Amino acid sequence: MIQARNVNKYFYVPQELHALKDASLEVAAGEVVVIIGPSGSGKSTFLRCLNRLEYADSGEILIDGEDLLDPRAEINRLRAETGMVFQSFNLFPHKTVLENLVMAQISVRKRSRKEAEAKSMELLQRVGIGEKFGVYPEQLSGGQQQRVAIARSLAMDPKVMLFDEPTSALDPEMVGEVLDVMKDLAREGMTMVVVTHEMGFAREVADRVVFMDHGVVLEEAAPGPFFSAPSHERTIAFLKQIL
Amino acid sequence: MSLYPGLDAPKPPIYKRLWALFFVVFVVLSIGGTYYATKSVDYIWRWYTVPQYFFYLDDVEVLAEAEGIVASIEPAGEESAVVIRGADGEQRYLVPADGLRVDLDQFVYVDDVLGSSQQWKSGLLIYGLWITLKVSLIASVFALIIGVATGMARISNNPALRWLAITYIELVRGSPLLVQMMIWYFVIGALINKSIAGWGLGPVPTIWFGVLSLALFTGAYTAEIVRAGIQSVHLGQMEAARSLGMSYGEAMRKIILPQAIRRILPALAGQFISLIKDSSLLGVISIRELTKITREVVTTSLQPFEFWIVCALLYLILTFGLSLLVQHLERRAI
């Protein structure tokens, strides 16, 4: 589903930084891949390269066979097909929850309003906040907002879901409700790439865990072997720190 | 009421009352002092001359256009139909019934008054107020469009658009509005009018040069406000919109701009209040707006105190009205 090969990314502001160094990742359809690593390791940058929120400077990224880095790629359709969930939710504060879900369905997926609303209500039910469709995002708790954000991405019928530290901005008691939604998704066979610090989630749900440090993919393995017998010394140091 | 309640110890009740009293005393003393000063320089206040410049009763007379004899007078609704038979045939006039001044069989000469009536008409100040309102309204709409477009061009990736926006903003902000009005009317206006006269078209009405100068002037300031507003909306909003597959334009239109405009409403209100006041300069290119009219009225009435105060109050009504409108929008937007 996703093939990223030798992806390089440089930043020049605030200072020059080689953020991704020949990072590669393959994700098969239905697979759940969790990317972990210390802050500044480039894991978020890598994830953001996968729907071109960052334009990779070199390398190759294929989404379901389509070349993402081709300037002529239908980027808006490709982005709709790779749902993105942000750390800070990024719901549209001037629109109701329902409208947050409906807007892009109408303009990007060309659905009728009726169709889009029906789909939105069904998704809101699925993430457990069906009754809150008429309120504005700021009236919701962090966990509820993040679930709305997940539903908003799902409304576009994505082939892949990308999660960029979806629980990092949440109060501890709300982390569970968001992870539950993500686990349900994984169980239903959604292809997912998740950047997170939730090791419990990685252990339980991931098919593969990827460890990144300083812009390099250092290690990838199934969660069992990854957590019990990590091979790289920096992985060992990192796991020791956070577990 | 404080923006930071709880940071300081609560004030005793006397605090509020004392300072409220101070405020009232200050206002009364200011007005009273001014009045006393005018008395001591022998200025005679004639406020009763003011209302006629808003509305006045005008005598409307119906005059005979040819001489002849009044052949018939018949009621026609609230008017009377007067028929005058002369050497050139009959002529029919409609005269207000209660203002009829001729009788049957009376001989009338050219320009004799057949009847008269009194009608309320709006005065000069109303006319000036209307012109100010019209110019300000049209210029505001253009200024907002120009401002939003330029603000977006200012942050565009396209160098041509960006530089054009910067050039326009710096050029307009860097010279006095009065000079710009002169240029619009006496330079650009003259060029345009002469050119289109070559194609057999009449001159562009002066008011449009006034509207243009005001709109372009305010547009430049609005552009910077709009740009700041767009930049104040969190980057994540654009990323979220684009990640759903929206185009840049759609995301800007539906996600970024609505949030930006809400935030910059107070600053925009200030800018458009300025526009209303700046329209007072249009007198220099012979647009008869409120200030120019007031100058005319002062010249004829010789009562400068009353009319300049009235002029200021009329501007206050316009600007305060706009201020209230924006406050209403602000409350509704939250």
Image (spheres, helix red, strand yellow):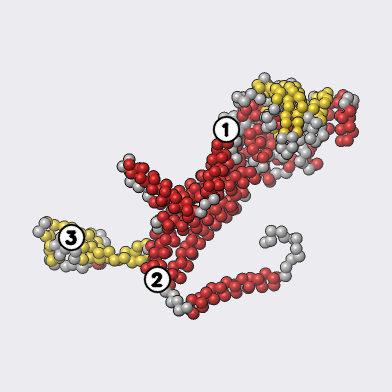
User: Which one is in front in this view, the residue at disc 2 or the one at disc 1?
Assistant: 2
Q: Residues within 10 Å of mark 3 (few under 14, many from 20)?
A: some
The reply to the same-chain question for discs 2 and 1 is: no
User: Which residue carries the number 1 mark?
Assistant: A107
Q: Chain of mark 2?
A: B
Kindly check if marks 2 and 3 are in contact, taking CB atoms under 8 A apart as contact. no
Could you say whether the residue bearing mark 3 is in a helix, strand or loop?
Answer: loop
Q: Which mark is residue B97?
A: none
Q: Is residue A212 left or right of residue B43?
A: right
Q: Chain of mark 3?
A: B
User: Which residue carries the number 2 mark?
Assistant: B302
Q: Residues within 10 Å of mark 2 (few under 14, many from 20)?
A: few
Q: Earlier in the sequence, mark 2 or mark 3?
A: 3
Closer to the camera, B251 or B225? Answer: B225
User: Which residue carries the number 3 mark?
Assistant: B65
User: Residue at 35% across / 66% down in the picture?
Assistant: B56
Residue B184 x/y as whole percent = 44, 49
User: Residue at 53% across / 59% down in the picture?
Assistant: B320
Could you say whether the residue bearing mark 2 is in a helix, strand or loop?
Answer: loop
Q: Is residue B121 left or right of residue A18?
A: left
Rendered image quadrant of residue B24: bottom right
Rendered image quadrant of residue B4: bottom right
Q: Residues within 10 Å of mark 1 (few under 14, many from 20)?
A: some
List the single residue furthest toward the top.
A65
